[in-house]
Image: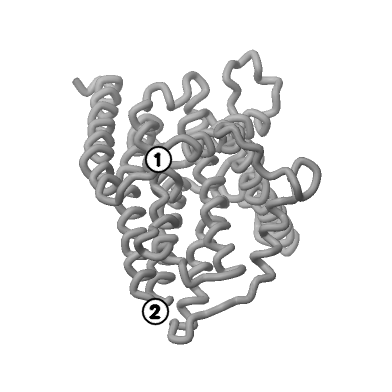
Amino acid sequence: MSALLQQTPSWGTAIWFILAAVVLLAVLLGFVTYAIYFERKVIGWMQLRIGPNRVGPLGLLQTVADVAKLLLKEDIRPKDADKALFTLAPILAYAPAFAVLAVMPFTESIQFADLGIGLLYYIALSGITVLGVITAGWASNNKYSLIGGLRSAAQMISYEVPLVMSVVGIVLLTGSMNLREIVEAQRDVWNIVPQFIGFCVFIIAAQAELNRSPFDLPEAESELVGGYHVEYTGFRFAMFMLAEYVYMFGMGTLITILFLGGWLPIHPALGFIPGIVWFILKFSLYVFLQFWIRATMPRMRVDQLMSFAWKVLLPVALLNILLTAVVVSYQNGMF
């Protein structure tokens, strides 16, 4: 697929990319629908409950029914809300979550765009979601929504700093921000081994970036009547929820590429297994970890959340950069 980028643009190429984008969107919608279902089932299993079991065989259509209910609900907008910004906010939250997947190499042949700065592209584009959160709080013309939006933005920006710094070690080791080259550099050993500190920082910061438990304050601010999207109903609220799960898809993909060797097998002897199978297995392990954390960990207070970002994760990320720089310098014979 990435080979198409080297060809002269044509109608055939454009149609191919449109079809591929439609297929990816269908995959994402299917993932979101059944990630919610399996999350309920896994949490139910861990907490000795049954989970969805009524709508459809084994409850498989429960999430489909929930999505249909959201899409068919009345679209209510506050009388004094900023109409344009109120409409734009869910789009700002969702569109970057889908766009970042353009540079993700799922296998050696499945990738939309092979950018030399693919990692930087992901980091830069994912930051736009913060604007959607702030815009939603502001446009609702609700003081509690505005406070919730600002607090959510503070959380996302604070944890984006250690998130970005945790991957600097990988860039130092591989000498590239190209995601394909980062995967190829892990043929001997996955980055989770030499960059275990960076991995721990990344996966914790990713939880906060995704607003997932135990950092799910943006959706659980009972003292702020529900956070930045309290005024949203129906399909607009569904877009915020969709953005969260699409970002979980994107973050799981990125962690698989950066730390778990992407499509590479766990041992060369197992190379006969298709790369996409390895990718899905590693990705599924991360998604299961997400469900596990939500089922077991209590929610943090907002002051604990902010202190942890600046007083713990940031210093640890800086230490990881320092240690990696020393090791790389030693390997290059600089001292």
The residue at 63%/76% (across/down) is: 74
Q: Is residue 43 left or right of residue 127?
A: right
* Whether residue 256 is visible: no
- Per the image, the residue denoted by label 2 is 141
What separation in Å lies between label 1 and label 2 (alpha carbons)?
A: 31 Å
The residue at 23%/25% (across/down) is: 326
**How far across and down, in percent of the image, does residue 85 sit?**
46, 77
Q: Quadrant of residue 82?
A: bottom left
The amino acid type of the residue labelled 1 equals Pro
**How far across and down, in percent of the image, does residue 224 sit?**
36, 64
The amino acid type of the residue labelled 2 equals Asn
- Per the image, the residue denoted by label 1 is 298
* Whether residue 265 is visible: yes
Residue nearer the viewer, 43 or 200: 43
Q: Is residue 36 left or right of residue 123?
A: right
**How far across and down, in percent of the image, does residue 114 sit?**
55, 46
Q: Quadrant of residue 227?
A: bottom left
Question: Does dot 1 land on a helix, a strand or a loop?
Answer: loop
Is 282 situated above or below 138?
above
Between disc 1 and disc 2, the foreground one is: 1
Residue nearer the viewer, 42 or 309: 42
The residue at 65%/45% (across/down) is: 37
Neighbourhood count class around disc 2 (C-alpha, 10 Å): few under 14, some 14–19, many 20 upward: some
Quadrant of the frame with the C terminus:
top left
